[in-house]
Structure formats: C-alpha cells, structure tokens
Image: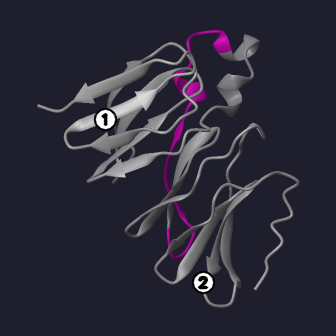
C-alpha cells in the first residue's frame, strides 16, 4: 500500500506498533498496518527543519514539535501536552522563532517517565501519565539529538557537541 502524506515536508521515520503504523510529518498519522487506511491524524506543529519520530508507549503515542503532545494511540485523542514556549526565558520568544517552533528532538519513554528536549536547550523529565514536570536541566544551547538510556544513565548531546550523562542513584 501507499499513503501520500501530502505534507510538502520530509516525514520522520515511520514507526510500526501493534497493528498500526505511526508517521509524523505536518501531522501525526495513525495507519492500519495491513491496509494503510488512515485511522486518525492530529496536528503537530514543527519548524519544518526537523521532525521528531513518533514514539508509541503502550496505549499512548508521543510527538514533539512546538509542544510535546501525547495522544491516545487508538483514538488520537489528545491526553496532554507540554508547550515549550511557555518555558522560554522572558522576552525570548519575541526575538527567537525557535521558541515557537522548538522540539525537534524525539522524546524517550523509560518506565513512566518521558525525557524530552527543546531547541532552547532544556532537557525535561515529565510524567508519562499527565505531563507533570518532574525535573528539568538547562543546557543552554539547542538540543536536536534525542536522549537515550543505558543502564541507570540518561545520555544526550547538545548543539555545541557536548555529551551529558545524568546518572540515577
């Protein structure tokens, strides 16, 4: 099967999960794995310079863009979102379009925690259940790469080429 995404943009890597395939482009789409029939789609604003990969997590699917958005994987209903611009330094959004279009980093789910990064250089740990910010760390430069977990360590690189390791206790 073939499904035109009609985005005019490059879509992120498609992700199969159960009997569905998720593709994030100008919208996050959920498609039947066997037929390609669209089940649902939702807007996920991006800068057009990069698009995060959809991240299935049990009954949820996550997509990062101007906001980290978490949807019900079956229905596409929005469960919660975290707006990156709301966390911006005062006045920064007026001078920097990244504030309104951040979040090209693909989020990571480990257990009940979502790790996500913004273009403004903030790394977050959020509750998968409701989006509550558990902690954040300001790296200070854009984060385009995605966090990874190895053992009890969370690893991420920033735009300036620094590798950070956050170790659990």
Q: For the C terminus, which image quadrant?
A: top left
Residue that badge 2 annotates: 33
Numbered disc 1: secondary structure: strand
Q: Is disc 1 surrounded by few (<14), some (14 to 19) or many (20+) residues within 10 Å? A: some
Q: Residue drawn at (37%, 51%), measured in percent from left and top?
A: 109
Numbered disc total: 2
Tell me where residue 149 appears, x and y as whole percent: 31, 43
Q: Residue drawn at (78%, 41%), measured in percent from left and top?
A: 48
Tell me where residue 152 appears, x and y as whole percent: 19, 39
Q: For the N terminus, which image quadrant?
A: bottom right
- The numbered mark, 1 or 2, whose residue comes first in the sequence reads 2
Residue range in magenta is 73-92
Q: Residue drawn at (59%, 36%), measured in percent from left and top?
A: 103
Q: Residue furthest bottom?
A: 35
Q: Residue furthest left?
A: 169
Q: Residue drawn at (65%, 64%), measured in percent from left and top?
A: 23
Q: Would residue 1 be found to the left or right of residue 108 on screen?
A: right
Tell me whether the residue at label 1 lies in contact with that at label 2, contact meaning CB atoms closer than 8 angstroms.
Answer: no
> Is 63 located above or below residue 168 in the figure?
below
Q: What's the distance in space between the residues labelled 1 and 2, CA to CA?
A: 32 Å
> Is 25 located above or below residue 104 in the figure?
below
Asked if residue 9 is among those painted magenta in the image, a careful observer would answer no
Tell me where residue 12 appears, x and y as whole percent: 67, 54
Residue that badge 1 annotates: 154
Tell me where residue 157 appears, x and y as whole percent: 47, 26
46 or 91, nearer to the observer: 46
Quarter of image, res 5: bottom right
Numbered disc 2: secondary structure: loop
């Amino acid at each position: 099967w073939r499904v035109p995404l009609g985005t005019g943009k490059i879509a992120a890597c498609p992700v199969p999960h159960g009997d569905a395939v998720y593709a994030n482009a100008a919208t996050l789409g959920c498609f039947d794995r066997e037929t390609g029939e669209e089940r649902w789609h939702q807007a996920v604003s991006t800068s057009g310079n990069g698009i995060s990969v959809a991240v299935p997590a049990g009954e949820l699917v996550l997509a990062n863009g101007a906001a980290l958005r978490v949807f019900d994987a079956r229905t596409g209903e929005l469960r919660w979102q975290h707006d990156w611009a709301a966390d911006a330094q005062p006045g920064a959004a007026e001078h920097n379009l990244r504030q309104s279009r951040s979040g090209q980093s693909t989020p990571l789910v480990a257990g009940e925690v979502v790790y996500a990064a913004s273009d403004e250089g903030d790394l977050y740990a959020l509750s998968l259940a409701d989006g509550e910010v558990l902690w954040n760390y300001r790296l200070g430069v854009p984060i385009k790469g995605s966090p990874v977990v190895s053992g009890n360590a969370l690893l991420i690189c920033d735009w300036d080429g620094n590798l950070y390791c956050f170790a659990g206790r």
